[in-house]
């Protein structure tokens, strides 16, 4: 039995930390689990990620940004996620298609149905079993990341507020799939809330272990 777990949230919410905590906990349970991320997780994806997040002199249009994320995702699904799920592994992904809806859709204002269509193509219609959304006010999240400003962190506060609004709408539209966690809680408390949910979904223990994919 495979399981696909996705972590989502705005800047500085702690999702990458919690994704790794969950990955380590599953390894301790002898679960066949891998950890990956977007944009990245493959050679192509890492190149795209550097282009998307870098503070280069040449601006990237919202449309180009959308297609670059889709390209990275398509490669990640083909090369990493789909094979792992077919092998019955647990896949933890730090960001997935919902980030595109939140950032390029609600944040940039691109057409949501168009994004959904492109997401479906890039993800090959693979959907997570659970989406863990760490909710945090943008002001608080950005304050956690001084001096580490990429293209997205440098956006106006209004942009980040639209992104959060998008996440809240997405989570409200599919409450059975989404777990919304208050990201202001202590890290240990957050990890226990996540484990309480994920532990109900994990397949039977196995002796195989996985490695994070970068």
Image (cartoon, rainbow, N blue to C red):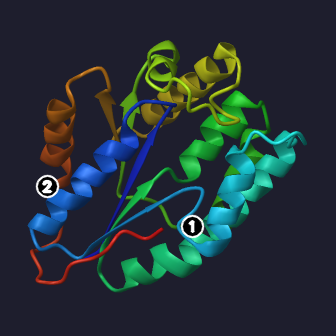
- Residue at x 13%, y 45% (from the top left corner): 196
Give left or right: position of 73 versus 4.
right
Comparing 121 with 14, the one in front is 14
Q: Secondary structure at mark 2?
A: loop
Residue 201 appears in the picture as rendered: no
Question: As displayed, is residue 191 above or below residue 24?
Answer: above
| Among numbered discs 2 and 1, the one appearing first in the sequence | 1
Q: Is residue 180 above or below residue 136?
A: below
Q: Residue at x 9, y 75 (%)?
A: 205
- Quadrant including the N terminus: bottom left
Q: Which residue occupies the foreground of this view, 121 or 55?
A: 55
Quadrant position of residue 149: top right
Tag of residue 200: 2
Q: CA distance from mark 2 to mark 1?
A: 24 Å
Front-most of residues 100 and 201: 100
Residue 196 located left or right of residue 149: left
Q: What residue is shown at x 69% (from left), y 64% (from top)?
A: 47
Report the residue marked by disc 1: 125
Spot occupied by residue 116 in the image (x, y as percentages of width and height): 67, 51
**Residue 82 in the image, given as x and y percentages of width and height:** 48, 78
Q: Specify the quadrant of the image occupied by residue 123.
A: bottom right
Give percent across and percent down for residue 141. 46, 22
């Amino acid at each position: 039995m495979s399981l696909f777990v996705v972590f989502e949230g705005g800047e500085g919410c702690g999702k990458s930390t919690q994704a790794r905590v969950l990955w380590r906990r599953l390894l301790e349970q002898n679960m066949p689990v891998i950890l990956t991320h977007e944009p990245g997780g493959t050679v192509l994806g890492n190149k795209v990620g550097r282009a998307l997040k870098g503070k280069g002199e040449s601006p990237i249009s919202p449309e180009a940004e959308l297609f670059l994320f889709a390209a990275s995702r398509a490669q990640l699904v083909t090369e990493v996620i789909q094979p792992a799920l077919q092998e019955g592994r647990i896949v933890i992904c730090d960001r997935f298609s919902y980030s595109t809806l939140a950032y390029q859709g609600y944040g940039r204002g691109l057409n949501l149905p168009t994004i959904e269509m492109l997401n479906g193509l890039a993800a090959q219609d693979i959907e997570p079993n659970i989406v863990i959304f760490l909710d945090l006010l943008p002001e608080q999240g950005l304050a956690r990341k001084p001096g580490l400003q990429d293209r997205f962190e440098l956006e106006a506060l209004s942009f980040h507020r639209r992104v959060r609004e998008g996440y809240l709408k997405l989570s409200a539209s599919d409450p059975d799939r989404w777990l919304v966690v208050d990201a202001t809680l202590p890290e240990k408390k957050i990890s226990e809330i996540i484990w309480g949910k994920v532990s109900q979904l994990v397949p039977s223990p196995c002796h195989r272990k996985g490695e994070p994919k970068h």
